[in-house]
Image (spheres, rainbow, N blue to C red):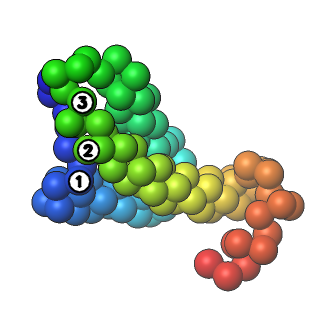
Amino acid sequence: MFIFDITNPLTLVLMLIVAILLIFLAQELKKSYIAAIPLCMFLILAVIYGAQLITLSEEYKDLASKLMWCIGIDFILIGISFFGYLWTDDTEAKKKGIKGVDNEALQWLWKDV
């Protein structure tokens, strides 16, 4: 059974670097859809890990703990990329003069950033 193992430190660091670079590229270009790329990628990975965990056969039961770790790390990466997307969306909305994603509820976050 193939698992894209993000518990490997090198893989984790590379994925985090790519996600952060895409978020900063989106911030620089003021295009929020670029920041949505890592978010969608991590969401797809979480669905794949969940499906693998549910359909895990008896011969691969030793991989269950590795999959649980991958899901946990993936949720952390989803949180990072989600806040990056919100940050980029707010910047793009201010540039275009339109309302961003739930602008009033997130004012406490944007005044500190």
Marks 2 and 3 in Cβ contact (< 8 Å) = no
Disc 2 versus disc 1: nearer the observer: 2
Q: Who comes first in sequence, dot 2 or dot 3?
A: 3
> Which residue has dot 3 on it?
61
The residue closer to the viewer here, 94 or 14, is 14
Q: Who comes first in sequence, dot 1 or dot 3?
A: 1
Q: What residue type is labelled 2?
A: Lys
CA–CA distance in space, label 1 to label 3: 17 Å
* Left or right of 87 in this view: 4: left
- Quadrant in the picture for the N terminus: top left
Q: Which amino acid does label 3 sit on?
A: Lys
Visible residue check, residue 66: yes
CA–CA distance in space, label 2 to label 1: 8 Å
Name the secondary structure under disc 1: loop
> Which residue has dot 1 on it?
7
Image coordinates of residue 78 in percent, x first then y, are 47, 50
Name the secondary structure under disc 3: helix
Q: In this view, does 21 lie above or below 60?
A: below
Marks 1 and 3 in Cβ contact (< 8 Å) = no
Image coordinates of residue 37 in percent, x first then y, are 41, 41
Dot 2 alpha-carbon crowd within 10 angstroms: few under 14, some 14 to 19, many 20 or more? some
Query: Which residue is depicted at the point 80% across and 51% down?
Result: 102
Q: Residue 66 carries which label?
A: 2
The residue closer to the viewer here, 1 or 107, is 1
* Left or right of 96 in this view: 19: left
